[in-house]
Amino acid sequence: MNVQEKVEKTPNVPFAGYFLNGVPREDPELTHVGPGTVCGEYLRKFWHPVALSSNLRDLPHAARIMGEDLVAFRDKSGNVGVLHRHCSHRGTSLEYGIVSERGIRCCYHGWLFDVDGRILETPGEPPDSKLKDSFYHGAYPAIECNGLVFTYMGPPEEEPEFPILDTFEWPRGNRLVPYSIHHPCNWLQVAENFQDPVHAVFLHTNLTNVQFTEAWGNMPTVDFGELDDGMYYITCRRVGDMVWVRSNHFLAPNLGQVAALWEDADEEKYFGRASITRWTVPIDDTHCWIFGFRHYNDNVDPKGLGKPEECGDNSVDFFGQTGERPYEDTQRTPGDYEAQISQREIAIHALEHRGSSDEGVLRMRRILRNGAHSETRVPQPADKKRSSGVIHTYTHDTILRIPVRSDVDDNAMMKELGRKVIQAIFAGDAYEGDDRQAEIERGLKALTADFAGGGKAA
Ligand code: FES
Ligand SMILES: [Fe+2]
């Protein structure tokens, strides 16, 4: 009997350890990311962050993404390069190279590579040598955006437009601060935390300490919706006379936005926007990065609890995200980091006993599997670019004053409300910028009147 058969035939008895002592294989389709793998080829069809702009100094930056060893650098003319790390002469790592006026020069025999992989010089060869013109070194296109360096590692003919999200500049005065966090585990278990809203009740509030605010500890109603390029959850929490409606929007395959962290839900709010935009980027099958932006503005953090100065290379300003704390501290008050990396190096889906609260994770996996097997072009965030040049996203906190009513099932009311809130937000898609915000606010205030006044909820 192999391990999988043994797991499936486990009798329903106490002291079942013996029957469960094997570990089946991980799901390779979603967790293996190297060149030629199903998921690896899918992920390669999107732009991904590979470094912070601050990593590109006078020295080259060694990076490893989806099992490929790379070197990133900014040459002295200001051009950013992302090249295969090993020199195409005889393999010396370009992390020991010399950043040059144009391109990077290998330390061993002085070959000079431009950011597009063109070989500019082979100084040890005779002047009439044609060697440098006979091939290109491996290179990927690079774009810098708000302090992150992105690259595209897929087929050149399928290179998509780089996505600019509405929340990069909204609300007005928004400040984006780049950060990264290294995780010694597979990318998928870190990414799928994003559509697992129930963990916030337990891990972040009721079982350890109040990691954000007490309001997080109220069990929400949970709902999900799918879009052609991703999905969102809708949670609704009762907080006194308020209902806190929240959605996090996931754009396949690995981009997500998180609404406010320190939300007390004690004041009305209409379509409050993202506090985090983040990409979960595989390093290889058993390591990944979160690269992202923290958003700082009065809308997501009116009390000014954020600390932008704490965000950067392997560092962010909210609880439980990195592997820097003493072990005993992490046991007493585990955070997202401990919960995710301890699901094994690669979480074993065949050993999971999933319940209704895992629906978001299952939907995410299905979206990824469909994308990975798609025989047509996979949808790209930039396909939805608006006339203003940005992509509308739907992450939000909305807090409406709708007191409990004795004649109404509160959970049923909240679930219906949550769906109507997201519809009111979609109705704003016909508008841009201030007009969009105004239209959404108008719709949400009308909903409040309906639900608080008994119209829809009665
Ligand atoms: S190994 Fe790089 S120039 Fe020779
Ligand atoms: Fe979390």
Image (tube, rainbow, N blue to C red):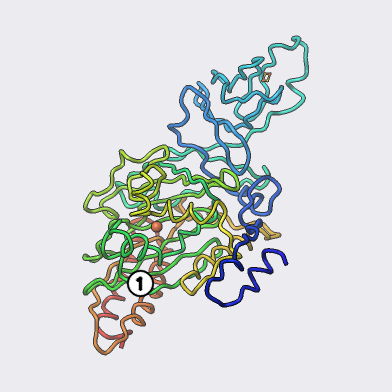
Image location (x, y in percent) of residue 27:
64, 59
In the foreground, 229 or 89: 89
Q: Is residue 286 left or right of residue 126?
A: left
Query: Residue at horizontal 24%, vertical 87%?
Result: 406
The residue at which mark 1 appears reads as: 220
Q: Is residue 58 left or right of residue 374?
A: left
Q: Identify the element where label 1 is drawn.
A: loop
**Ligand 2 picture quarter:** bottom left
Image location (x, y in percent) of residue 452:
25, 80
Q: Amino acid at mark 1?
A: Pro
Above or below, 244 against 112 in this view is below
Query: Residue at horizontal 55%, vertical 31%?
Result: 62
Image location (x, y in percent) of residue 49:
51, 42
Image location (x, y in percent) of residue 219:
34, 72
**Quadrant of residue 140 in the image?**
top right
In the foreground, 103 or 404: 404
Above or below, 216 against 420 in this view is above
On whether ligand 2 comes within 8 Å of the CB at mark 1, the answer is no
Query: Residue at horizontal 31%, vertical 82%?
Result: 410
Query: Residue at horizontal 39%, vertical 67%?
Result: 425
* Quarter containing the N terminus: bottom right
